[in-house]
Image (cartoon, rainbow, N blue to C red):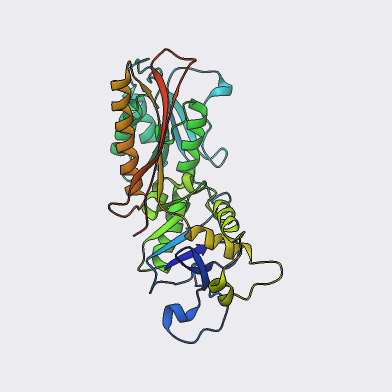
């Protein structure tokens, strides 16, 4: 049995789901064995305590209104007009940003040597611990983003560093905006994950992704942007699953009002229906089928590693989809590769 958890604006809601079927609300009986007073029990600090009897707890939460931390933004590339400079982090005006020399073309050609000293000075003097790093050409070659992360980690012990290449967008501005928001959400995601570990002891805790599927609490801390709209996605998934009726077991367990189940219940149900998922998107260069096959295998190996990090049970991880599109507006032999993987909860 899986616990589905919806973190709404008021009290959180927990439901029990077995084999995809909505069972009942989780009450005090499930936790303590004592008589329940009925309805949902909101625990102090936000989560309901639901541990015994559940093999996983799946949490749906939207981060759209989460507190955003100030971010130190590092762009690796050439000079640009003021209108195209990196955003100064979130919330507006609270972060700082810089551009340092370096980067690559989308064919992997170095544009300039990385200005490591400029990175070091900025990291040491910015006074922040949440960093977003974006380098030109990193979907093809991420060396300069990785080098910047190494310097920042050495200068700012305990720094939380987001690298834009992990979000896969070929356009620099889109990757940079994603990296900044991911970094800004990091502290809030950490607090939510800490609360989940405290209030849902025992079973592994997962968080609903914005599109479909789940990620582990560890993955949620590292990539909270993947769960930015996890509540909305879970609500849509729950509604779709219930569209054909609740089923005899669920109907007997629920006193369904004329207007249907509350959104929070449907959201919690939708969260419990997912499984761990991960995606990788890269720009690769291949001069023939054999070279493209090697690049695809590298991407598949990476996404399988990611889905295990996202909480897939050992042996359950598999590649679910591979998409290869030639980039016709760039030199021959460049492809945009997307690979998705999925697995099962323990």
Residue 46 appears in the picture as rendered: no
* Quadrant location, the N terminus: bottom left
Query: In the image, 317: left or right of 13?
Result: left
* Quadrant location, the C terminus: bottom left
**Residue sticking out furthest to the right:** 258
Q: Quadrant of residue 313?
A: bottom left
Q: Residue at x 29, y 37 (%)?
A: 301
Residue 22 location, x and y as percent?
Answer: 52, 67
Query: Does residue 260 lie above or below 135 as drawn?
Result: below
Q: Residue at x 51, y 37 (%)?
A: 89
Residue 94 location, x and y as percent?
Answer: 53, 40
Q: Quadrant of residue 264?
A: bottom right
Residue 121 location, x and y as percent?
Answer: 36, 29
Residue 305 location, x and y as percent?
Answer: 30, 43
Q: How many marks?
A: 0
Residue 64 appears in the picture as rendered: yes
Q: Residue at x 71, y 67 (%)?
A: 259
């Amino acid at each position: 049995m899986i616990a589905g958890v919806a973190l709404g604006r008021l009290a959180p809601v927990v439901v029990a789901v077995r084999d995809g079927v909505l069972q009942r609300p989780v009450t005090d009986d499930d936790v303590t064995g004592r008589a329940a007073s009925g309805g949902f029990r909101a625990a102090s600090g936000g989560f309901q305590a639901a541990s015994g009897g559940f093999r996983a707890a799946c949490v749906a939460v939207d981060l759209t209104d989460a507190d955003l931390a100030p971010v130190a933004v590092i762009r690796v590339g050439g000079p640009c007009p003021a209108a195209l400079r990196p955003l100064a982090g979130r919330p507006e005006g609270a972060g700082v940003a810089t551009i340092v020399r370096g980067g690559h073309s989308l064919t992997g050609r170095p544009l300039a040597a990385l200005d490591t000293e400029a990175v070091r000075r900025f990291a040491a003097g910015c006074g922040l611990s949440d960093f977003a790093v974006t380098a030109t050409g990193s979907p093809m070659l991420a060396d300069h983003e990785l080098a910047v992360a190494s310097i920042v980690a050495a200068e700012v012990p305990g720094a939380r560093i987001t690298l834009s290449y992990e979000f896969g967008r070929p356009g620099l501005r889109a990757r940079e905006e994603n990296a900044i928001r991911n970094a800004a959400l990091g502290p809030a995601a950490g607090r939510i994950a800490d609360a989940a570990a405290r209030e849902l002891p025992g079973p592994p805790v997962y968080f609903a992704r914005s599109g479909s599927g789940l990620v582990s609490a560890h993955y949620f801390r590292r990539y909270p942007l993947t769960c930015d709209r996890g509540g909305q996605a879970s609500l849509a998934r729950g509604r779709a699953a219930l569209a054909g009726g609740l089923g005899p077991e669920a109907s007997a367990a629920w006193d369904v009002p004329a207007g249907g189940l509350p959104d929070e219940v449907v959201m919690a149900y939708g969260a419990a229906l997912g499984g761990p998922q991960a995606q990788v998107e890269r720009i690769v260069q291949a001069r023939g089928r054999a070279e493209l096959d090697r690049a695809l295998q590298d991407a598949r190996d990476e996404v399988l590693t990611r889905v295990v990090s996202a909480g897939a049970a050992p042996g359950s991880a598999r590649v679910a989809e591979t998409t290869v599109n030639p980039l016709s507006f760039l030199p021959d032999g460049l492809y945009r590769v997307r690979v998705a993987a999925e697995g099962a909860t323990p």
